[in-house]
Image (tube, rainbow, N blue to C red):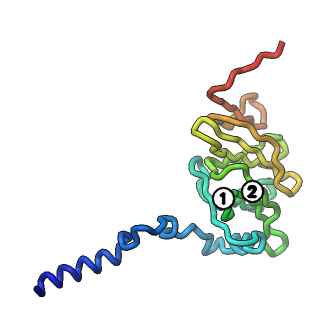
Amino acid sequence: MKRFAAIFLIFAIMFSLSACARPFSDPKTLFKSPKISGDMQFIAEALDKAVDGSYELVSPTSGDYRTACTAVDLNSDGTTEYIVFYSLSNGEIHLVYISKAGDEWRVISDTSVSSNAISTLQFADLCKTNTLEIIIGDPLFSENQNQLSIFSVDTGELVCLAKESYTSFVICNLTGGNKSQIFITEIGTVAESVP
């Protein structure tokens, strides 16, 4: 009998300490969303001041930049700026441009992105202004239906320069000049010829 009680007690402890103890709980409640901390705490403080309510950081799922907070010198002035993605409780994703103003880091511009996920983030000088444009790939409906959004910070604010559907894209230099271009492919479209 003591042996049965000991075995029962061991299984009861193992069951209560495992996730199986909550068979009907939502898995999302078992995970905490990532937070900005440590030496990047100033970014979290700037976001907290600018965003009303709670938010979760969102990271691109592919490409070279797979973090929710990316450091980059967008305007070639030697000062690092930050590009951050976050989502609100309604699932709406925002793109944020954070820069240092005096001694304080602050959100310079915050705009909604038209997707519920970010697949890729890239940077390139597409306009030959010595300022890097922000290129975002958003999955819309399927692997073959995506939206490419291009943002500029030339005016100090995030401005959407273009939105284009795509299946895949590559940033390259097709002309041999000092300006990058985007080569876009899209499966399932018919090319129209101009008479």
Image coordinates for residue 122, horizontal then vertical, percent: 67, 47
Quadrant of the image for the N terminus?
bottom left
Q: Secondary structure at mark 2?
A: loop
Outermost residue toward the bottom in this view: 2
Disc ID at residue 15: none
The earlier-in-sequence mark between 2 and 1 is 2
Q: Is 119 located above or below residue 182 in the figure?
A: below
Residue that appears at 60% across and 35% down = 144
Task: Return the residue at label 2.
Answer: 73
Residue type at the position of mark 2: Asp
Residue type at the position of mark 1: Gly
Q: Are marks 2 and 1 in contact (CB under 8 Å)?
A: no
Q: Secondary structure at mark 1?
A: loop
Residue that appears at 23% across and 83% down = 9
Outermost residue toward the top in this view: 195
Residue that appears at 67% across and 25% down = 189
Disc ID at residue 91: 1
Q: Is 186 located above or below residue 74 in the figure?
A: above
Image coordinates for residue 135, horizontal then vertical, percent: 72, 46
